[in-house]
Each structure stands twice: as structure tokens, then as C-alpha cells.
Image (cartoon, rainbow, N blue to C red):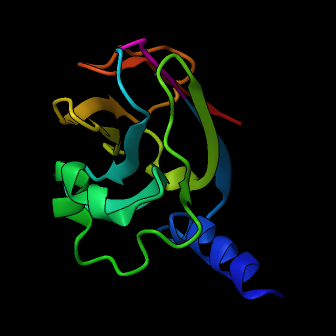
Amino acid sequence: MSKPLMTTVLAASALALPALAQSRPVTLTTTLKNYGGDGAYLAVYLTDAKGAYVGTLWVAGGKAKYYKNLADWSRLSAGDARRLDGVTGASVGQGRTLKVSADLADALIDAGYEIRIDAAVEDMRDSPGEIRVPLTRAGAGKPQAGKSYVQSFSYQIQ
């Protein structure tokens, strides 16, 4: 297996390991507003019931020097050396949609975990805590509005 493929497989399975149980694909869809600026950097991550960092699901934006502007994610994930393995892509332009998938352990669903998104746009205000939604079966498919840059966010559990 190639190193990039192995890295992607390890990163995707890391969030499925906590319960050593069945995992489900979860599709995350984030649509940005037309906010009049450059492409947005987004950190999509999971926290537990106490707000502790569990893992990074996706980071949109290729220049690591700007990750510090994703303040909550940067602070919470600082000790996670694998936080970026296989989970990064290009920034997301205004009015555009980012759609990514992750495998999450069944035990994480309806157990107090949250999906969070931090957002940052060059020459505009950063938006830590742009989105905070409980990871529940009841919340799947229900769009949530963001605070500054996100028009809507939703997730689907397969």
C-alpha cells in the first residue's frame, strides 16, 4: 500500500477506533455565504461531551501558516501530531460547497459528541466556533446556519 493511501486509511479509521465497533460513513456538507472575500479556511473536527478534542475530520486550506487563525481547533488539537494526516484540501471559495466524508464509530453518535467548524478568511475576521452541532441521528439532514461565513452545514449518516 502506498504511503499516502496508508496515511489516509489510518486517519479515516482513527475516529472509528474508540469503540472498536461498527462505523458509519458520515457525509459533511458545508455551503459558504457570498461574503465578499478570499477563499475560506475551515477546520471540521469532533469534540466529546466535555468539549475535549477527539479528532480532525477535514481542514480546507493548504497553507499551514494560516491554521493558527482557526483558533479553537488549533488550540484544542495542538497535541495531535496526526491531526492533518490525509484530511486536508484546498480552501473553499465564497458561495461554494465543501462535501467530505468520514467514517465515525457508531458509539460516537447520540453520545454527546459535537461536530465543530472554525472558519477564517484572509483580511476578514476569524470565526472560531462558526458551527457547533451535536452528532445525533435526529440532527442528521437538518441544515444549521453558521455565525459569519457558513450559509448552511448539514451531515448525513449512512
**Drawn side of residue 155 relative to residue 125, left or right:** right
From where the camera sits, is residue 20 visible?
no
Q: Quadrant of the C terminus?
A: top right
Q: Based on the displayed image, in which of its 4 quarters is residue 10 positioned?
A: bottom right
Q: Position of residue 47 (x, y in %)?
A: 29, 52
Residue 101 against residue 55 in the figure, above or below: above
- Between 132 and 90, the residue placed more toward the observer is 90
Residue 12 against residue 113 in the figure, above or below: below
Residue placed at 21% from the left, 58% from the top? 68
Q: Based on the displayed image, in which of its 4 quarters is residue 77 positioned?
A: bottom left
How many marks can you see?
A: 0
- Between 112 and 27, the residue placed more toward the observer is 27
Examine the structure image and report whether residue 37 is included in the region drawn in magenta: no
Q: Which residues are magenta?
A: 30-35
Residue placed at 68% from the left, 47% from the top? 25
Residue 13 against residue 70 in the figure, above or below: below
Residue placed at 62% from the left, 42% from the top? 100
**Drawn side of residue 126 relative to residue 47, left or right:** left
Residue placed at 43% from the left, 78% from the top? 82
